[in-house]
Each structure stands twice: as structure tokens, then as C-alpha cells.
């Protein structure tokens, strides 16, 4: 018996050949390359957009803040007549009453020569025109403005403040004040708090203004605690009588000097006669750019103490904020800050006037006027608005070939950074705004 059998074999599962594997890998490589061509440009575009938005936001926030502060600046009087002498909505110069000047008639006019006692408080294109490179980032501007909000009226036929010129001596004065009455002790305490009285017995820098617009810095040096213990009584101290009616009135008598912390109003002689207003809530503020930061100082800019901005090489990455005495950081990534001054006659001054007048210190002169004559055309009293220009840049640059053409910082007003700067790949934004000085009307 024979049997014929055929053995069938299903065989093991067949694998990929080498050719198939290579073809698959090549296909995957092509797919990944195509995906990369889409994703990498999208990522670069998103980063470029982020940097552009960052620069615009920094410029917009800085401009909005500065515009708000400058629009709030005021001269602390309502006078628009020709006799106005150096209102202080913004300060270009002050006069240091330390005996170094020419007495009662200091001249802060760089076109003819500065009085030795003149101190510049606003600058154009640091370190040009007498500044130095540590006042701010080189090429940028500095501005000092003032805001006054609260007043106290003076009284006293014999002890109202009368100050002729720039003599910096202690003088008695009295101010009508009853917000703490009927408690005389509380009245004096309230007055001290309102005027910023310190533990040393001195007030904060204040300002006195006449009805004609004349003004002077003012600082209380002695609050006369013992003499003011009956300020709210029916029979107050001898000096607390209204000079117009001779009626007794609640008041505070103090000893004060005209020049707060040694500073006096710039310009011609200040003869302050009653009635006077004492501005007890005056805030002086200075603005500058230092190493990529917009900074603010609560006080008047002083080139002798505020030369504390370290030098940074052009095109370098902005460093983290470095703490400096008297200054506070506002916003980062600010590269350039410029101010142009708009006068009543329509002229624009940002360091030059097309040859109309000599280039002085790049900011309006501060010599005021005498009698009823109008001040000089380009005196600080003639400025009705300030144009602000801010240039901000992104916090980091993009790589060369990343969609950004290398370029130097843009021109801003009379400052051309490209003269000394090198091209880079930072994204920048530049914005401008016009800030009107709120109580300066169109005309004297």
C-alpha cells in the first residue's frame, strides 16, 4: 500500500526588505523636511511679531504716562498778562542763591552767558551744551515739570512775606489757616503735615506766588511751635490779622527762606508783595532715560547729584534695572526720549530754530521780564505746549537673516543716533504726542 502525501508549509511571516525600509525612511525624511519648512518660518514670524508688539507697547505706555504728567503741569497762577515772571510749569533753569551770582538780577540765558549761580534742570541731547554723559543716556533729553494743587493765603500787615530779589535769608511770614481749629495744637499739626514738615523742623520745598504771577521757591525753616499755641483763639497772635479788614483771623506764623534748599526762581528780580498764595502741594518731577529705562525723580533735576547714569555701549542689551539714589524705574526698553518746545508764535524749538537764534543749551532761556514788558520771544514763559517723542526697542534682537534688515536707531527730533550707532537687528517703535500746558492760554 502506497501513500502519496504533500507537505504544505505556510512559512514564517514575511519581513520588509532593505529596499522597502530605505524607501520608507526616505519618505519620512521628505515629510519632516516639508513640515519643517512650514513650522520654522511660522515660529520666526511669531517671534518677530512678539518683538514688534513689545516695542510698540513700551513706546505707547511711556508716551501715555509722560503726556499725562506734562498735561498736568501748571504755573500755579491764573495770570496771562505780560508781567508774568517765569512761571514754573516746567523748569529749564533755577538760580542757586549761594552768593556765587550777580546779586538780585540773575540771568539764565545761555545765548549771552549764564550767571554763575544758574543751574540747568532740563537738557537737550545729553551730553551736549554743558552736560555730561552720566546725566542720562547720551543723546536723550531731560525735563523737569511742576504740579501745584493746594494753596494757603497769606495774612498779616506786618509779617506777610515781602522779598526783594534773590537774597536767601530767613524771614517771618504768616499764613491764614484754620483747618485744625478750634484746637490750636491740632491746627499747627495739620499745617505741618500739609507742608511736609519733617523731624528737623523744615518743610518740603514749597512755592509762593503773587496775584501778578511773580513766584519764588519757599521753605519753612522754623514752625514757631511756642508762638502758634493760640492760633485758633479769639485773640490770636499779633501777626494774625487780615490786613484788608484788620480783623483777627486764625493763622500760622513761621520763619522761612525764599529759596528752598538754596534754589531761587530764575530771571529778573522777584519782588513779592501781598497778597500771596502759598502752594503747599507742589510736586516737582524730572524724567530721563538711563540704560533702557524710563526713570522718574520726585524733585528738581540737579546735575551735581543726578550724574549717576552709567555709560552703556551702543547696541548692547539693556541691563536689569540698577537702583540709583532719588530715581525710580517706570518702564523698560525705552531707548530715546526727546522734547520739543512749542511757543505762542508757533515756533518749535528742539535744540535749534533754523538759525533764528543762537543755539544755547538746547532748552528755552529763563530770564522772565521786568515791569510790564513782555518776556523775550523764546523765554520759557512763552512755551504753550511740549511735543514728546519716545523711541522704544524690543528686549532682544533677532538673528541676522531672520527676517529683519540691520538698521541703526531712527532719528528723533534733533537727535540722530545713526551718526554714532551701528546697525543692529532690534525692532523699534517711535511715537509722538503733543502735551498742552493746561493753564497757558493762546497769548500773553
Image (tube, helix red, strand yellow):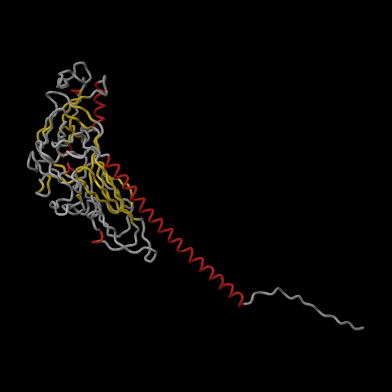
Above/below status of 394 relative to 25: above
Residue at 20% x, 23% y: name it: 251
Nearer to the camera, 383 or 115? 383
- Give the percent coordinates (x, y) of residue 275: 16, 27
- Give the percent coordinates (x, y) of residue 178: 24, 23
- Give the percent coordinates (x, y) of residue 265: 15, 39
Residue found at the very far top of the displayed protein: 234
Nearer to the camera, 171 or 241? 241
Quarter of the image with the N terminus is bottom right
Above/below status of 99 relative to 230: below
Q: Determine whether, in the image, residue 115 is placed left or right of residue 199.
A: left
- Give the percent coordinates (x, y) of residue 4: 86, 82
Q: Within the image, what quadrant is residue 3 found in?
A: bottom right
Quarter of the image with the C terminus is top left
Nearer to the camera, 285 or 353? 353
Residue found at the very far left of the displayed protein: 102
Q: Within the image, what quadrant is residue 283 found in?
A: top left
Amino acid at each position: 500500500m502506497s501513500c502519496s502525501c504533500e507537505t504544505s508549509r505556510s512559512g514564517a511571516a514575511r519581513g520588509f526588505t532593505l529596499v522597502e525600509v530605505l524607501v520608507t525612511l526616505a519618505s519620512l525624511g521628505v515629510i519632516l523636511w516639508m513640515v519643517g519648512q512650514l513650522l520654522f518660518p511660522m515660529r520666526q514670524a511669531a517671534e518677530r511679531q512678539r518683538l514688534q508688539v513689545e516695542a510698540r507697547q513700551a513706546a505707547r505706555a511711556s508716551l501715555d504716562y509722560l503726556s499725562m504728567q506734562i498735561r498736568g503741569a501748571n504755573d500755579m497762577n491764573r495770570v496771562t498778562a505780560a508781567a508774568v515772571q517765569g512761571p514754573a510749569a516746567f523748569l529749564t533753569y533755577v538760580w542757586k542763591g549761594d552768593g556765587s551770582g550777580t546779586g538780585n538780577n540773575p540771568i539764565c540765558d545761555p545765548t549771552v552767558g549764564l550767571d554763575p549761580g544758574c543751574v540747568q534742570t532740563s537738557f537737550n541731547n545729553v551730553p551736549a551744551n554743558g552736560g555730561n554723559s552720566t546725566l542720562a543716556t547720551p543723546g536723550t533729553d531731560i525735563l523737569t515739570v511742576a504740579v501745584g494743587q493746594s494753596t494757603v493765603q497769606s495774612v498779616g500787615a506786618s509779617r506777610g512775606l515781602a522779598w526783594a530779589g534773590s537774597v536767601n535769608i530767613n524771614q517771618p511770614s504768616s499764613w491764614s489757616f484754620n483747618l485744625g481749629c478750634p484746637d490750636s495744637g491740632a491746627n499747627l499739626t495739620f499745617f505741618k503735615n500739609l507742608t511736609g514738615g519733617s523731624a528737623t523742623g523744615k518743610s518740603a520745598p514749597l512755592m509762593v506766588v503773587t496775584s501778578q504771577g511773580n513766584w519764588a521757591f519757599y521753605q519753612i525753616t522754623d514752625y514757631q511751635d511756642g508762638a502758634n499755641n493760640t492760633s485758633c483763639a479769639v485773640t490770636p497772635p499779633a501777626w494774625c490779622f487780615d490786613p484788608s479788614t484788620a480783623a483777627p483771623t486764625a493763622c500760622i506764623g513761621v520763619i522761612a527762606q525764599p529759596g528752598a534748599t538754596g534754589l531761587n526762581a530764575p530771571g529778573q528780580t522777584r519782588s513779592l508783595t501781598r497778597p500771596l498764595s502759598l502752594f503747599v502741594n507742589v510736586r516737582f518731577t524730572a524724567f530721563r532715560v538711563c540704560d533702557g529705562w524710563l526713570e522718574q525723580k520726585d524733585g528738581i533735576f540737579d546735575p551735581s547729584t543726578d550724574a549717576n547714569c552709567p555709560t552703556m555701549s551702543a547696541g548692547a542689551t539693556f541691563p536689569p534695572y540698577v537702583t540709583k539714589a532719588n530715581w525710580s524705574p517706570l518702564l523698560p526698553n525705552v531707548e530715546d526720549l526727546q522734547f520739543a518746545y512749542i511757543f505762542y508764535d508757533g515756533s518749535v524749538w528742539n535744540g535749534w530754530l533754523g538759525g533764528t537764534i543762537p543755539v544755547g543749551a538746547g532748552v528755552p532761556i529763563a530770564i522772565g521780564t521786568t515791569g510790564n514788558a513782555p518776556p523775550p520771544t523764546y523765554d520759557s514763559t512763552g512755551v504753550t505746549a511740549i511735543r514728546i517723542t519716545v523711541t522704544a526697542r524690543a528686549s532682544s534682537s533677532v538673528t541676522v537673516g531672520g527676517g529683519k534688515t540691520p538698521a541703526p536707531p531712527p532719528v528723533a527730533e534733533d537727535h540722530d543716533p545713526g551718526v554714532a550707532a551701528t546697525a543692529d537687528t532690534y525692532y523699534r517703535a517711535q511715537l509722538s504726542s503733543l502735551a498742552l500746558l493746561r493753564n497757558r492760554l493762546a497769548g500773553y
